[in-house]
Amino acid sequence: MNATSGPAPASAPLPLVLAGARGHGRWHLRNIRRLEGLGLVRLAGICEPRPLDAAELRDAAGPLDSGAPRSRESGAPDARSSAGPEQSADLDALLASTGARIAVVCTPIQTHTDLALTAARRGAHVLLEKPPAPSFAEFRRMADGVAAAGVACQIGFQSMGSHAVPAIRRLVAEGAIGELLGIGAAGAWVRDEAYFRRAPWSGRRRLDGADVVDGALTNPLAHAVATALALAGSTRAEEVERIETELLRAHAIEADDTSCVRVVTARGVRVTVAATLCAETASEPYVLVHGSRGRITFWYKQDRVLLQRGGHGPEETVHGRTDLLENLITHVTRGEALCVPPEDTGAFMRVVEAIRLAPDPVPLPEAYWRAEAGENGPRRVVAGIDALVGRSADTLGLYSELGAPWALAAAAEVR
């Protein structure tokens, strides 16, 4: 992902705590290290149930001496030494001892609300990984609590930092493709069975009585949903009129791995997203904006845009991207507007809620999927799904409307 060169450093780097430094958290470690190099932040603490070892910490703090820090609970030397950041399994205590101004929360979905509110109560501004919460009630509790605490919160939809998003919205507003007819999105990814065993919450709808809602549309391909809604100009909860879902699974999990959703916005725009983690071949996810006189394709991970319209040749552009943590820093230090405040993910959370309330995903009959060898072991492939996902984006149709016989039992609607 592209990033800007960064805002001018404040008078002193802002102390920062990272909650969740493994898995996707490793990306945040590398990004925080980059921002440390720009003099914008200082990684003051890492919150993990199991402390990072010396090799893992190199991503965060550079080379370490032989006295690698361990958690204070373990009886190890104080981790606030020059060797690296303090480590603790207790975020509240870590925020108190480090005086962190910013907390990056990249933890299991069902922990997001409580940890964001813990940071807010300590006066720390929050970068909260997507999805922001597993239910609309938890989302509202988080957003309202953060606002009451008077701190800023940025939701980690990195695609919303792409400069392509406002550029596409300008093209649509200027009539470059005529009347807006609808928006489709397609995501065909490959995930093997090991992916769903990477953590206790992976592939779960609920865990120990708590909602998780870790499905294809709500977590790995959540950017497709959020980006499509943003291009429709409908990001807030009240801008959603109706939601239809079709949730299925080929893998032996609780959540969906092959699913689609159609949102009708309050302005009457249809937004359809089709996704699978059982693709025949992995491909770049994209959003397709349909107009009466043309269309715009946006490959959101690449910040790449293709404009096709009558009377013109195809026009392809690649845009820059604002890093969301940099943007949060600039908001805190200079008052710049946030790229993704919580309220601008309300429509996405309405989709999460519709998926949470929908019947459990329907198992795909074995006749429609096959087992193959993946990088880390076996995976399941849904026959013809790559083409079906693309057809959904092209036609704004759901799987059941496109003739997939296995989808009829999965249709559900929420108003």
Image (tube, helix red, strand yellow):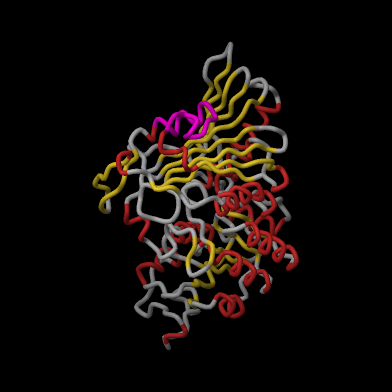
Q: Residue at x 65, y 21 (%)?
A: 176
Q: Nearer the viewer, residue 144 or 272?
A: 272
279 relative to 220, above or below: above
Residue 300, given in percent of the width and then of the height, sits at 52, 39
> Which residue ends up furthest to the bottom in the rendered image?
75
Q: Nearer the viewer, residue 178 or 58?
A: 178
- How many marks the image carries: the answer is 0
In the displayed structure, does residue 238 sit left or right of residue 298? Answer: right
Residue 214, given in percent of the width and then of the height, sits at 48, 55
Residue 294 figure quarter: top right
The residue stretch that appears in magenta: 387-404
Residue 118 figure quarter: bottom right
Q: Residue at x 47, y 42 (%)?
A: 409
Instruction: Report if residue 399 lies within the magenta region.
Output: yes
Residue 90, given in percent of the width and then of the height, sits at 53, 78
Residue 80, given in percent of the width and then of the height, sits at 50, 79
